[in-house]
Image (cartoon, coloured by chain):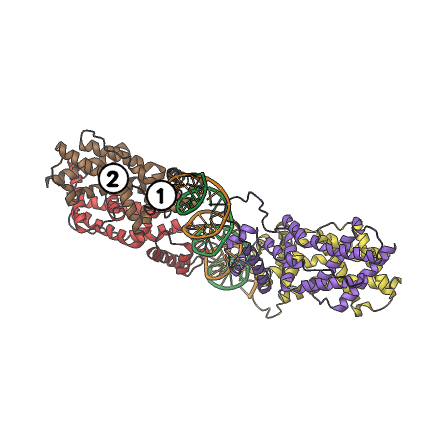
Chain colours: A red, B brown, C purple, D yellow, E green, F orange
Amino acid sequence: MCRSSSRSPSRTGGRPRSAAADAAILEATRAALVELGWSKLTMGDVAGRAGVAKTTLYRRWAGKNELVVDAVAVLFDELELPDRGSLLADIEGVVVQFAALLERPETKTALMAVIAESTRDEPLRERIRTSIVERQKRLVLAGRQRAQARGELPDSPASATGTDDLIFDVIAGAVVHRALVSAEPVDAEWVRRFTALLLGGLAAAAQA
Amino acid sequence: MCRSSSRSPSRTGGRPRSAAADAAILEATRAALVELGWSKLTMGDVAGRAGVAKTTLYRRWAGKNELVVDAVAVLFDELELPDRGSLLADIEGVVVQFAALLERPETKTALMAVIAESTRDEPLRERIRTSIVERQKRLVLAGRQRAQARGELPDSPASATGTDDLIFDVIAGAVVHRALVSAEPVDAEWVRRFTALLLGGLAAAAQA
Amino acid sequence: MCRSSSRSPSRTGGRPRSAAADAAILEATRAALVELGWSKLTMGDVAGRAGVAKTTLYRRWAGKNELVVDAVAVLFDELELPDRGSLLADIEGVVVQFAALLERPETKTALMAVIAESTRDEPLRERIRTSIVERQKRLVLAGRQRAQARGELPDSPASATGTDDLIFDVIAGAVVHRALVSAEPVDAEWVRRFTALLLGGLAAAAQA
Amino acid sequence: MCRSSSRSPSRTGGRPRSAAADAAILEATRAALVELGWSKLTMGDVAGRAGVAKTTLYRRWAGKNELVVDAVAVLFDELELPDRGSLLADIEGVVVQFAALLERPETKTALMAVIAESTRDEPLRERIRTSIVERQKRLVLAGRQRAQARGELPDSPASATGTDDLIFDVIAGAVVHRALVSAEPVDAEWVRRFTALLLGGLAAAAQA
DNA sequence: TGGTAAACGAGACGGTACGTCACGTCTTAAA
DNA sequence: TTTAAGACGTGACGTACCGTCTCGTTTACCA
């Protein structure tokens, strides 16, 4: 799961890379994002905060884009889907968590920026997909399976027809748009209304 | 509706600003976005393409962010909501248009970038909201009113309760997420499924 | 006689280059040579001393080599050949001046360095020749002509046969070697002995 | 004659230093000088050519300056003074040899460079003097003694009065200046004229 | 119709960050 | 203990854009 340069080769002689440096750099990157935001963050500044030479950054990451993706990716892994007893409650729970994550300054400023960069950089897009996007689809999958176990949804293999992907785009897209584009709060009222809308749609689709 | 610096004052003597320059600059900006993408676009390059001095750009826009917002904003005004006979068809129509707009390289690379910048720049966020976001809510409004006229939706003043905003976030968010984050095609099948989900939700909400 | 980039072109629009900057930069270069020596002198340091941006240096000189050549070249123009009444006294006078020039720390550290660089850089060699070397041959020429006027040397057109060049190489070479390679003082005694040797050779050659 | 660090001590346990490495390094240094010239030669490159780790270089030489002095010093030891029957012929012979040595790219690029460095580095100057300069005075000494044995020069102990040093500076200086500064060929004609001048001076001095 | 004042093109300016390079030191495992 | 390998902190490199400034020129309005 090493997100840095995937040096497999040889591992013969030579001083090994400092493991502590990786952690310090990613932490420094998040701190710089909070203080400066994406566009004012510089590699030199991150290096300084991490107590590391600029060359060490470039030895491990190709550039600012890759570094920031790795730095924020770990934050997304904190999302969970606790069992709250019903599909509606489960969805509300994860939406609230996701919204809270997007409110954090490091996520807010970095996420859209790396996505913007990725529209012109296929390897970066792949990195984002692997490190962040695909990784969160687990929540949709788990939610659906739990709902099916409860009998709230029919047992159709929704993933085969792309329904999971659709749900994911709708949830993630709506929350991101509310939080970052409309720039209005993802409060309890909004979450309630959104979840109701989504569940209604799912139920209608299930009947069809 | 002048998006450039709103110079009202004096207006006494002196050479007036070239109107042609504005158009040339915005066109050059879009061309540069297509060729170079957001992060490689430079003010000097735009000036060169437009056959204009760099100072002329800075006389009219505060920076790259503002310039690009103005350059792409006009593209969003091309979206329309032709009457296709049913709410479902209307929504499908506008989603397809919106997806096509997001596939254009200048929009794709610029939209997320300026939104990312706006998370740290309140005036920029306001400019985006005014020039792009709020301007498109007319489509939701028009669609709802037309559906109400048709009797497809109850006559409740949905805007007052924020439902219009919710619908907007869901549609725009889902399409943007599908197109730019998941980076998968917004094809007819996806549009059909998404629209069905949304309409199902709306119907369920209307009954409640 | 502009030693910087030989911009002749157009001289149309645009802010003109600061003339003061040129002087400040060359002065700063000499100061840096005195303090740091050739190998520790950096472009950034010179820029700082001159109160100028690094880019301004690079706009005017291709690099450290060219800059230093220009900075020290002017020092060599201070050499003179006052009429001391005899060829021997004239030569002694110029040798003493030349030795004093080579004792100055900026000259001492820079001269050999740029010559070393020039062995791999033909344009630099040409620049050195034009700015420094050829410029000093005037002293040999003047000395010979004066001696011929005095009747100390026959009136043969020595320059045609390359004798002037030979004399120049012998004088300059011997003094440089004594001062920088042997690193021993070019004192009055040495000058006397060297001049006697040279004059003896010239006299013998004249008789042949 | 070990020019590297004079480690006498301990010599107890541990792996002994590779003797072959020294030779390989010096040879690699000369090769790098030929290909890259002084200013582009790097320690890492030399290490790579020699098949040796960078640390090994630094264990044996303090830096690039010292390494290059040792690498070229040996070339100067190849100079000889074969007996050609007359002082004039002997001088011409050695001048031709010296000029040929200065034409070699490794010598040409390195010699002036280390001399330039030495103006700011007393230990380096001492190393150059010991390894290169003083070592060649043997040629002047031998030439004078041979000429005295032939009766071409009086038997005065010229070395005591510094005449040997003067001759050395004149010969070496003139040839170096011709070859590296004036950058013109040290051809037979020039050698003939220079030697004649020098011998004429010596003869005149001897009569005085 | 001629003066005035702003906008214009050109491009030099002081800066900042870039990403690379070489330095000389260090840390490892192997010899 | 030396070796090869190679990561490390350091600091200069030369470049690219930034946004500002200083020029001489152009162009509309108004007196």
Quadrant of the image occupied by residue D170: bottom right
| Residue E31 placement (x, y as % from top left) | 54, 58
Q: Is residue D96 visible?
A: no
* Earlier sequence position, callout 2 versus callout 1: 1
The subunit carrying tag 2 is: B
Q: Is residue D28 above or below residue D17?
A: above
- Residue drawn at x 40%, y 40% is B32
Q: Can you say which quadrant of the picture contains the C terminus of chain B? A: top left
Label 1: few (<14), some (14–19) or many (≥20) C-alpha neighbours in 10 Å: many
Q: Secondary structure at mark 1?
A: helix
Mark 1 sits on what residue?
B68
Amino acid, disc 1:
Val
Does the CB distance between marks 2 and 1 fall below 8 Å?
Answer: no
Mark 2 sits on what residue?
B136
Q: Is residue D5 above or below residue C163?
A: below
- Residue drawn at x 68%, y 52% is C129
In this view, the residue in front, B203 or C41, is C41
Q: Secondary structure at mark 2?
A: helix
